[in-house]
Image: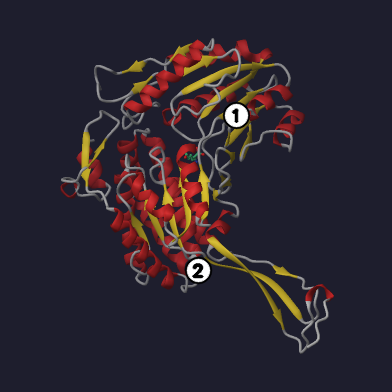
Amino acid sequence: MSFTSVLEAAGLDPSDLNGGDLSITTPIDGSEVARLTKHTVDDVGEMIARAEAAFDMWRRVPAPRRGELVRLISDELRSRKDSLGALVSLECGKILQEGLGEVQEMIDICDFAVGLSRQLYGLTIASERPGHTMRETWHPLGVCGIITAFNFPVAPWCWNAALALVCGDPVIWKPSEKVPLCALATQRIVERAVERFGEAPDDLSQVVIGRADLGRVLTDSPGVAIISATGSTGMGRSVGQAVAARFGRCILELGGNNAMVVSPSADLEMAVRAIVFAAVGTAGQRCTTLRRLIVHDDVYDDLIPRLRSIYAGLPIGDPLTDGVLVGPLIDEQAHDRMHEALSRAKVDGGVVFGGERAHLDEYPGGYYEHPAMVEMPTQTDIVRQETFAPILYVMRYRELGQAITMQNDVPQGLSSCIFSNDVRETEQFLSMVGSDCGIANVNIGPSGAEIGGAFGGEKDTGGGRESGSDAWKGYMRRQTNTVNYSRELPLAQGITFEV
Ligand code: UN1
């Protein structure tokens, strides 16, 4: 498959994708696949104004009709799953299966949002006053700015956009400058759905092409009611502070440092499969990647050799080739960070298995790495940091309490899991004294969450929740209504105030 044919199949015309000053390369071999023209700060200001105008109309459209637009987006995505999945693979380097999985997440959240469009339920509340009723209603909030990272170029946009659109909020998307082609191809898909829908306002969905300075226009503008940002903790800290300074609303889904506890009763066959998918999938570049393996002494010497033998034979290479399980890192900087982390781990007494660069001769401009497993004597500083690369730190434990303390003793709080067939252990892990993460699993790995649950985590992960459950409430404003249908005017709390 040539790069040009992947672009064309995804609905992009390569001749439109040159001449600009933003160079887009593929991590497969480092070659340039497009040059885009960046938006300016003024362009983004105008986009916000147009989105506000779209809000004025879209909020009046009944929610189930808004759901119909999202149903059409899901319909368009279904027929373009293969081509968009391949573009994801080309632009960010994840293997095709994972590119397709990402598009499937988009379809799933659209379907979820369509159902939701008839279920934006509020409460009715008993009033303390006779002849009064109270209720809670949910109204559209305003323009939703969506900032996304390179590693999931399309799904996180959709977790936010599908909900925002049924909730009545127009969206402005600032994708990572490393993967804007996926955003442009997705925008074409949305445009086709909007055309079929026929009655959506212009500029309901817009894409900003450029770097962080343009994201800052969104975070600083009072015209953007809500910002949902996915990416590093550093990025989230500056976005969160900028949005808080103007009392805007933020949903942050930031770094993870996800652990698995493997207990003596674990099914090791299952654990091995879960570990390998979670630690080396997406070349270790998921926010939910398994980064820390906390293994009971009794099973350590059985588990680790099994993992080593699988690690030694992992198929690494072009992510668009069948059978490959590990694609390249996104770029040279990611490669440098991986090797710096491995050097620091060694200084701390770590024993490294794997971690060498692969395919250097074949792809001098591609950063392919053998995933690394590092046996650590303790959880040192480097283990407590998120390095966005396929490095799995392995440590031992003796008592479950000690394993849970280690699991929680990192700044991040996204995902976690335990492999155990002992219900006392698994329930403790899920309890108020167990994992402190937003996601805690039993007998499955920490990555690959379904869209139906709320997705996000605590501490340095930012505290936001996207996707399923009641995450939709983040995109609407809550209003409490008290209605008096009596002929009296009693005051609450029994206060008398005669005039
Ligand atoms: C991310 O890496 O930002 O749970 C998102 C998962 C995917 C989402 C990852 N559904 O691994």
Secondary structure beneath dot 1 equals loop
* Nearer to the camera, 351 or 45: 45
Q: Position of residue 163 (x, y in %)?
A: 49, 57
Q: Position of residue 223 (x, y in %)?
A: 43, 62
Circle 2 Cα neighbour tier, 10 Å, few/some/many (<14 / 14–19 / ≥20): some
Quadrant in the picture for the N terminus? top left
Q: CA distance from mark 1 to mark 2?
A: 43 Å
What secondary structure is found at the residue carrying circle 2? Answer: helix
Left or right: 72, with 409 as reference point: left
Of residue 266 and residue 402, the one placed in the foreground of this image is 402
- Residue 406 lies, with reference to residue 481, above or below; the image says above
Name the spot of residue 91 as percent of width and height, x first.
31, 38
Identity of the residue furthest to the front in this view: 499
- Figure quadrant of residue 437: top right
Residue 327 shows up from this direction: no
Q: Is residue 264 visible?
A: yes
Give the residue at x 18% y 50%.
16
Whether residue 147 sits left or right of residue 443 in the image: it is left
- Residue at 52% x, 52% y is 244
Q: Where 242 falls versus 322 (above or below)?
A: below
Q: In percent of the image, x 79 and y 75: which residue is there?
A: 492
| Image point (29%, 57%), residue name | 42
Amino acid type of the residue tagged 2 in the rendering:
Pro
Which amino acid type is marked by label 1? Answer: Val
**Scheme of colours in the image:** secondary structure
Residue on which disc 2 sits = 64
Label 1 neighbourhood size at 10 Å, few (<14), some (14-19), many (20+)? some
Can you say which quadrant of the picture contains the C terminus? bottom right
**Disc number at residue 410?**
1
Q: How many marks?
A: 2
